[in-house]
Each structure stands twice: as structure tokens, then as C-alpha cells.
Image: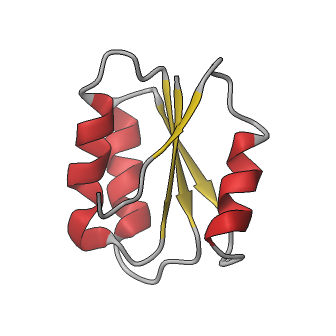
Amino acid sequence: ISVVLPYRNAARTLAEALESVLADPACGELIAVDDGSDDDGAAIVSRVARGDRRVVPVSAGGGGGAAALRLRVERARGGLIGRMDADD
């Protein structure tokens, strides 16, 4: 399963959301899409990605949540695609 997790200024909840997805053994890929954050979100994703090769950090540049999802869904490698919000 590829899980797409778009986020914007979600540093407060992002680490917990990432860890929650990665705890599921069915997760083969977690695509974390930064939609123009100006907080520490990108640094959190980078730190987690260094420790887990399933994490794929992507910068969408602020095009909005739907654009961020489309960008990564098109490139997901898993046979199934899930979505997770950074504050779930």
C-alpha cells in the first residue's frame, strides 16, 4: 500500500501521523507531500525518512491539497493507495 500524506504547517501533529502510518506493516510507501509549509514540517519528514526508507518526501510548492494528492497518486508504486491527513 502507498499512503499519501499531504501536509501544510502541520509540524505539531506530523511526527505522530507519520509514525502511525509506518507502524502498519502493510505500508510499503509513505509519500509525504509538503504543500508550502513554513514551519518545521519538512525537517520532521526528512528526519523520519533518514530512519525509514519507505518515506518519500516531496515538495508540492503550495498548489493546494488536491494538487498535492494528484501529484503523488500519479507516481505511487503500491497496488493500493491510501490517504492520511497530517492531523489525523
Asked if residue 79 is positioned above or below residue 82 in the image, the reply reads above
Percent from the top left, x then y, of residue 37? 49, 78
Q: Residue at 65% of width from left, 17% of height from top? A: 79
Vertical order, 43 against 32 (above or below) = below
**By what rule are the colours in the image chosen?**
secondary structure
Which residue occupies the foreground of this view, 19 or 57? 19
In this view, 23 is above or below 6: above
Which quadrant of the figure has residue 13? bottom left
Quarter of the image for residue 38 reads bottom left
Q: Residue at x 38, y 67 (%)?
A: 41
Nearest the eye: 81 or 39? 81
Residue 46 is left or right of residue 19, and the answer is right
Q: Name the spot of residue 7 as percent of width and height, x first.
A: 47, 65
| Front residue of this view, candidates 12 and 73 | 73
Relative placement, left or right, of 17 versus 4 is: left
Residue 14 placement, left or right of 37: left
What residue is shown at x 29% (from left), y 70% (from top)? 11
Which image quarter is the C terminus in?
A: bottom left
How many marks on residues? 0
Residue 36, horizontal then vertical, whole percent: 58, 77
Name, please, the residue furthest toward the right: 74
Q: Position of residue 12 (x, y in %)?
A: 22, 71
- Residue found at x 39% / y 53%: 45
